[in-house]
Amino acid sequence: MALDLILAALHHPLLPGEARQQRLYRLLRSAILDGRLSAGWRLPGSRQLAKDCRMARNGVLFAYQQLLSEGFLVADRGGTHVASLPSPAAAAPVTAVPGDILSRRAVGLAGSRLPEELLPFAPGVADLNAFPWPVWSRFLQQAWREVSARQLAYAEPGGEPALRRSLATFLRVRRGVVCLPEQIFIVAGGQLALDACARLLADPGDRVWLENPCYQAARNTMLAAGLEVVDVPVDAAGMAPPDALWRDKPPRLLYLTPSHQYPLGSVLSLERRLAFLNQLKPGANWLIEDDYDSDFHHARPGGRPLPAMQGLCPDAPVIYVGTFSKLLYPGLRIAYMVVPRWATEAFGAAIAALYRGGQAVEQRALARFIDSGRLTRHIQRMAPRYRQRQQVLRQALLDGLAEPCAILGGEAGLHLTVRLPAAAPDRTLVAAAARHGLAVRALSSYFADARGDNGLVLGYGMAEAERIPELVQRLCLALAEAKVADYPANS
């Protein structure tokens, strides 16, 4: 039976960087996804499985709890059972030629935004004052000592091999991404990664589904590529397309921020993740998974966020996009894409023809930074700080705002979203807040329709916890000014 195979696999060597409890979690999850452990199947008690696995009971409890929190298992008085879930469709062997994989533009190639402000409450900015500059400087110096003519020329297509190897291990351990180093393509920033997806995977006039509200730069990129945008509503569980949309307006590209929807902060449920994956067909659709800030997860201290969609079905037509802007600093301009194995050759040829890589020295330094464990330590050091700042900000808003307002998000990332009454138009409030030294953003600006929700997006990456109450007081003053300024228009 499946459990016997799992127990036998536990005697095999661990993957690099993997603990025994993580291996048990990985094996159980894989058995559920591929149907070896069927819906309703009752798992043995933690003590019995710990005995069978010859490991500490706490390790079994870790695996069970993680699978329960992600929705793979359910628990009741009768014990712990496999949840009833749609299974990802088995990916058929792909033998498509490049013309079936990429856009016509990409096949031919192969054969506005200002810098982030450093004012308080600017969304999407990490705490740059807390970055370990002395350590990073040493790694840069080591990389510069190895410089040759090759590092000063354009970077290798796909990026430095050392960084691609480091990332493959880091993403497997941290995000459950299943990939080989050659599936990773290093690019100069997340915006360029989205541009590559829009230009290499679709042709002008092709349809792209975007979340509504949506990350503004993603929308601009798709429009600049000449794609037809379909705005799909978002609810508390992520993108929620009507049933008829797949039939009436199927997408060539589907853009998602599943781990932390931007800007509302919702997390795409496991059921919807699997349902989206089931709809994808190689050669017909591509899903762009923008995983921009999931490493800072606040809902379950000490736990992990839901794994990447890419890892649920590694051969599905999914492009996993990540960046170091939130982990390190935006000026580094290093991001990456993970493409399916069957598309690696065609995608690599097209991207090499369209873009020129650089920053080989920084890439080599970053590989050392990851391999030394310094990146993981930095994440572990910053996560509780950001969690505290979010808690302080949430409480300060509840205490300071004169009227009750909905506060959205909070499971991950570096921002909260606040819905405000219509009496204070958010775009007027943004201008008033700027006069008080605050860089907030209007929630309505993220919607396709100008009549979108009224509110603010507040980043807390650069706002120290002890300063937040005073900053919220400034925001409340700006709110009062915005109401007065808009009074003649509404009277």
Image (spheres, rainbow, N blue to C red):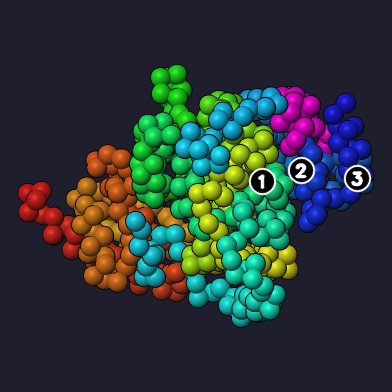
- CB atoms at circles 2 and 1 under 8 Å apart? no
Q: Amino acid at mark 1?
A: Gln
Say whether disc 3 or disc 1 marks the residue closer to the N-terminus: 3
Instruction: State the SS at label 1.
Output: helix
Q: Amino acid at mark 3?
A: His
Residue closer to the observer: 168 or 327: 168
Q: Which residue is mark 3?
A: 12
Q: Which residue is mark 1?
A: 183
Percent across and percent down for residue 442 are: 30, 53
Task: Work out whether residue 280 can be spotted.
Answer: no
* In this view, 304 is above or below 72: below
Mark 1 nearby-residue class (10 Å; few <14, some 14–19, many ≥20) = many
Residue 189 is covered by the magenta coloring: no
Q: How many marks?
A: 3
Spatial distance from mark 2 to mark 3, Cα to Cα? Answer: 15 Å
Q: Which residue is mark 2?
A: 25
* In this view, 138 is above or below 43: below
Percent across and percent down for residue 280 are: 56, 28
Question: In the image, what residue occupies the spot 50% across and 38% down?
Answer: 108
Mark 2 nearby-residue class (10 Å; few <14, some 14–19, many ≥20) = many
